[in-house]
Amino acid sequence: MVTAWRSLALAGALACATAGAALAQSGWQPSVMSVRVTPSEGRLRPGQQLTLIVSAFDATGAPLGGMHVAFSTSDPRIVTVGEDGVVLAVAPGAVTITAQVGTGPGARSARAQVRVEGQAQQAGSSSWTPGIRSVQIAPRSGSIHVGERLQFRVRAQDMRSEDVPFAQVAYSSSDVHVATVTDEGLVSGLAPGKVTITARVGNGPGARSATAEIEVLPAQP
C-alpha cells in the first residue's frame, strides 16, 4: 500500500512538472488582477523624457514579477514610448500612455496622462533635439585615397516625417588609424583599409543612427 501511494505521488509530481514546463514554453503568465503605472500623470517640455514604472498584482494583492508589458501612446506625434517605458516628448499636446500586461480576456492595463507644454527651442539656444524617427547619411558608401577627404551629409526626420534642420549629429569612425571624421562630417583617409562611419542623432532610447562604408585606397603616385 505504501509503495502504491508513493507511486501515485511520484506520478502526480511528474505530471505537475510536465504541465508547468509546457505552460512556461507556451509563454503562460500567472493571472493578473490589477496593474498600476507610476507616475500616473506628468508634464514635459519637448525633448524631455519620463520613465514609467509598471506594477502587476494577482488576486491576493501580491506583486507579480517578470511580467511582459506592452506600452502604447494615443498620439506618437506628441509623445512616443519605448518598450522599456521611456516616454519622449515630441510636440505640445496631451496624450494617454497605456501599459498592458497579458493578452486576451485576462489582460489588464493602466494608463498615464502626459501633457507636453512649450515650443521647441530654436537652433543655437540649446542642444535640444526633437524626437527622431529616422536618420539618413550620404553617401552610403565610397572610396578615397590616402590624403583625400570626403564630406558626409545627414538628414534627420522627426515623428511627423518632417526634416529636422538643426539636429545635433555625432560622427564616429570604426578605425581612426584608417580614417578620421570631424564633427562636421568631413572624413580624411589616413591609411589603406575599410572603415564604417556612424552618424548618430539624439541621446538615450530616442537616438537614431545611420552608417556608411568607406574604403581608403593607397595614395596615388
Image (cartoon, helix red, strand yellow):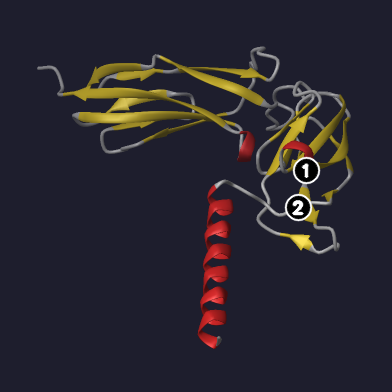
175 or 133: which is nearer to us?
133
Q: What crowding class fits label 1: few (fewer than 14 Cα within 10 Å), some (14-19), or many (20 or more)? A: few
Q: Which residue is mark 1?
A: 106
Left or right, 65 with respect to 149, comes to: right
- What residue appears at the point 70 percent right and 22 percent down from the top-left corner? 123
Q: Is residue 61 left or right of residue 184?
A: right
Q: Is residue 203 left or right of residue 191?
A: right
Where residue 31 is drawn, which disc sits there? Answer: 2
Depth check: 162 or 35 in front? Answer: 35
Residue 66: horizontal and vertical position, in percent?
65, 55
SS at mark 2? Answer: loop
Q: Look at the image and tell me in which quarter the N terminus lies.
A: bottom right
The answer to whether residue 107 is seen in the rendering is no
Coordinates of residue 155 in the picture (x, y in percent): 55, 16
Where is residue 161 shown, x and y percent of the image? 65, 13
Give the amino acid type for the residue marked by disc 2 in the picture. Answer: Ser
Mark 1 and mark 2 in contact (Cβ < 8 Å)?
Answer: yes
Q: Residue at x 39, y 14 (%)?
A: 139
Three-letter code for the amino acid on which mark 1 is drawn: Gly
Q: Is residue 187 above or below residue 32?
A: above
Instruction: Please identify the residue farthest to the bottom as the structure is shown.
Output: 2
Position of residue 18 measured from the top left corner of the image (x, y, whole percent): 52, 60
**Alpha-carbon distance for marks 2 and 1?**
7 Å
